[in-house]
Image (cartoon, grey):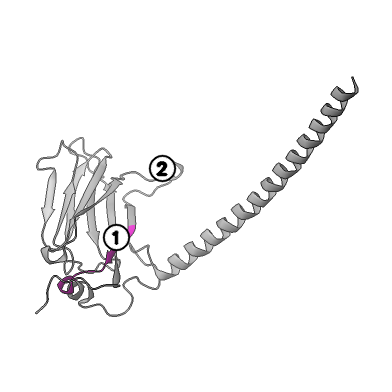
Amino acid sequence: MKTGKRLKGVVISKPIVYGNIATELLSKKTDHTHKWTVFLRGPNGQDVSSFIHKVEFRLHETFVNNNRAFKSAPYEVTETGWGEFEIITKIYFPPCSGEKPISLYHMLKLYPPDSQLQTWPKGKPVNNFFYEELIFSEPTEEFFEALTRGSHGPEIPLKASGNQIFSLESEAAECERLESAVSQVTEKYGEYKSRVRAAEIEIAELRRDIAALESAR
């Protein structure tokens, strides 16, 4: 029988993807310009309900029933509208977990970047995805079983494809970009440090010259 005893020294990470997909409505019968879907799922689109008890999406207050709750997958809301606004995605974990709910925030994105607005193909979806890893430190025995149930192989795909933009390949590329950025920052820091040191030496010499002039009066 599993208990609420926590497993000391155990840390488990579970990746999720959340955000929205939006498509322009080519036939506009109202002032609504886009159809959009806000969602939460696993990186491969897999069901994450084994360790998530409920997901709530808080929409703009102008929507009827603007707090949409789901206790089973798929965790998603599809609506139409014309404006962008902040969406709060609140995740609840099973009672056996002893974990507090967490909230994720993102802006509903309907339009492509300004630099691509004029050339964006009609009907092409705008993807606004975010990757997050939920970290569970010292989970209870029962929750540990839920977290590890059905886990075989990597949960993040090797290569990006279709609407799946997060992958081990893109993660490695991002690490390389970060390492390059750190290297450049370190190099610039060294240059500025040398300039500051040279300036400090020059100031010290000027102070000595001023002191010598004042003594010679």
The answer to whether 38 appears left or right of 205 in the picture is: left
The answer to whether 137 appears left or right of 52 in the picture is: right
Q: Report the residue at 12% width, 49% height from top.
A: 68
Q: Report the residue at 69% width, 49% height from top.
A: 191
Q: Report the residue at 16% width, 37% height from top.
A: 61
- Amino acid on which disc 2 is placed: Leu
Where residue 33 appears, as percent x and y from the top left, is 25, 40
Question: In which quadrant of the rendered image does the N terminus lie?
Answer: bottom left
Quarter of the view holding residue 207:
top right
- Amino acid on which disc 1 is placed: Val
Task: Check disc 1 and report the residue beneath it.
Answer: 17
User: Any mark on residue 117, and which?
Assistant: 2
Question: In which quadrant of the rendered image does the C terminus lie?
Answer: top right
Where residue 62 appears, as percent x and y from the top left, is 15, 35
Q: Report the residue at 21% width, 38% height from top.
A: 32
The answer to whether 24 appears left or right of 101 in the picture is: right
User: Any mark on residue 100, and which?
Assistant: none
Question: Considering the numbered disc 1 on the image, is that residue within a helix, a strand or a loop?
Answer: strand
Give the spatial CA distance, label 1 vs label 2. Answer: 25 Å
The answer to whether 108 appears left or right of 95 in the picture is: right
Where residue 18 appears, as percent x and y from the top left, is 27, 56
Q: Residue furthest top?
A: 217
Task: Tell me where the magenta segment starts and ends, as one range.
Answer: 131-143
Decide which of 39, 96 is in the foreground and name it. 96
